[in-house]
Every structure is written in C-alpha cells, then in structure tokens.
Image (tube, helix red, strand yellow):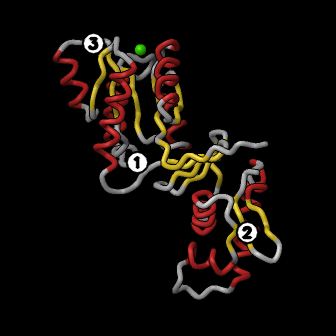
Amino acid sequence: MYESEINIVKNKILIIEDEEAIRDMLGYALMKEGFLCDEVGDVEQARTTIEVNRPNLILLDWMLPGMSGIDYARRLRSVRETRDIPLIMLTAKGEEADKVKALDTGADDYITKPFSTKELIARVKAVLRRYSDGAASGVIEVNGLLLDSETYRVSADNQVIEISPTEFKLLHFFITHPERVYSRSQLLDHVWGENVYVEERTVDVHIRRLRKTLEPFGFDKYIQTVRSVGYRFSTR
Ligand code: CA
C-alpha cells in the first residue's frame, strides 16, 4: 500500500548555518513541527536554493564563511525578489548593539545562541503569523512534488519543472482535491471558470500536456484517466 502524504500550505524554511551540528538540530526541530526545510552552509548555496525553491522564511546565521550573514541579510532586503521573505537572524552575539544591527538590516527577529528549540519554534511561528495576514502563501507537497501557489512554481528534487499557467491551475486543483473523479465539464468549471466557453476536449489536451510535463519526474502516473467518467489525481 502506498501511503500518500498530502500537506497543504506547508511552510518551507531555508536554514543558512555553517555549523553542521546546529544546522541539523534546527532542521530536525523544524521538520518535527511540520515545516519543510532546506539546509545550506553558506550564502552561495543559499542563492541557488532560493532561485529554485523560494522559502517562506529564512533562518540566517550571522557568522558564515565567505559573505557574512549580516551582509547577506542586507542583500536580501535590497533585492525585489527576496525583499518580502521573512527573515530571522541567528547570532552568538548577545550584545545589545549587535541585536540592533541585526534588526537594522531588515531582519524580522533574531535568536541568540544558545537557544532552546521551543524558543526557536515560537519565534518562527510568530514571524510567519505576522506575514500570513493577507495572501495565502505556502507550499503544497505530495510525495516530493512541490507546488508553490504564490510563485506558480512547481519543483521536484530541487529542480524547477517548467509549467504553463493553465497546467499549473489544473495540477493545483487536482492536488487539493485528491482521490475524487471529475468529469471534463466539472474540471472546466473549477479550473477555467464557469463563464468561460471552452470545449471539453480542451481538457484532454491540457491533461496530456500536464502528464508530459510531469513524466520526467515520474509524477504523471498520479493523473489518472477514469474511463467514460473523467480524471482523478491519486497517488495510489
Ligand atoms: Ca556560524
């Protein structure tokens, strides 16, 4: 039996920390709380990860090899693409001046090492809550297939899957309504909208494209044809 795990609106956190023990501890604590985590050891790796998989929050260590966390925080805040990502600084420096400096760069909060995982989780949740008023951001994940409803991006194994807006909407609808069969006309109503005139066979065309898009990653088998009825999304 294949247990499918479907997590809707799971927040993804990027951990930038060069000390492996701390990085592992952070990742473990956050994943236990239901967050998705990407873990990197320096700014260079962080950049690549953000491009592929935009995080919902960044945990950034102050002292890093190469570019420091504080300089990177400034950089993140100065670029349009990353300006709005919630940011928490990790610092071993407990002095008041450093805390002020961390917040001056545009960080939303800071955590002073050593810290308890309880404190970490509480601060992460508090910052995310502050941001979540308004647009629903978040990532939907099904067995390693990630859908970001904010950026309209789909990825698997840290690879971006090129997808058109219609295929994205179709996939998004399927993933949020799993295991149920929808007729072509129902899919038209839900995905294209009720007042749009589109022929039913258009659905078949887009289903075919969606499967082709997902095929290299092995996810095309989730889009299933139910003969003489329609289609369904199922991981079984
Ligand atoms: Ca460090």
Q: CA distance from mark 3 to mark 2?
A: 56 Å
Specify the label residue 34 is tagged with. Answer: none
Q: Is residue 149 above or below residue 199?
A: above
84 relative to 209 in the view: left or right: left
- The answer to whether any part of residue 68 appears in the image is no
Image depth: mark 3 or mark 2 in front: 2
Residue type, label 2: Tyr
**Mark 3 and 2 residues: CB-CB less than 8 Å, in contact?**
no
In the displayed structure, 146 sits above or below 74; it is below
User: Label 1 neighbourhood size at 10 Å, few (<14), some (14-19), many (20+)?
Assistant: few
Q: Amino acid at mark 3?
A: Lys
Kind of element beneath mark 1? loop
- Which of label 2 and label 1 is nearer to you? 2
Q: Which residue is mark 2?
A: 231
The tag on residue 93 is 3
Q: Residue at left 64%, top 58%?
A: 178
Residue 215 seen in the figure: yes
Residue at 50% in and 56% down = 149
Residue at the front extreme of this rendering: 1
Which residue is at the front of the view, 73 or 7? 7
154 or 77: nearer the viewer: 154
Per the model, the C-alpha gap separating discs 2 and 1 is 36 Å
Residue type at tag 1: Glu
Task: State the residue at coordinates (74%, 56%).
Answer: 222
Image quarter hosting the N terminus: top right
Residue 81: where, in percent of width, then height? 40, 48
What is the secondary structure assignment of the residue under circle 3?
Answer: loop
Residue that label 1 marks: 81
| Occupied quadrant, residue 213 | bottom right
- Asked if the residue at label 3 sits under 8 Å from ligand 1, the reply is no
* Residue 61, quarter of the rendered image: top left
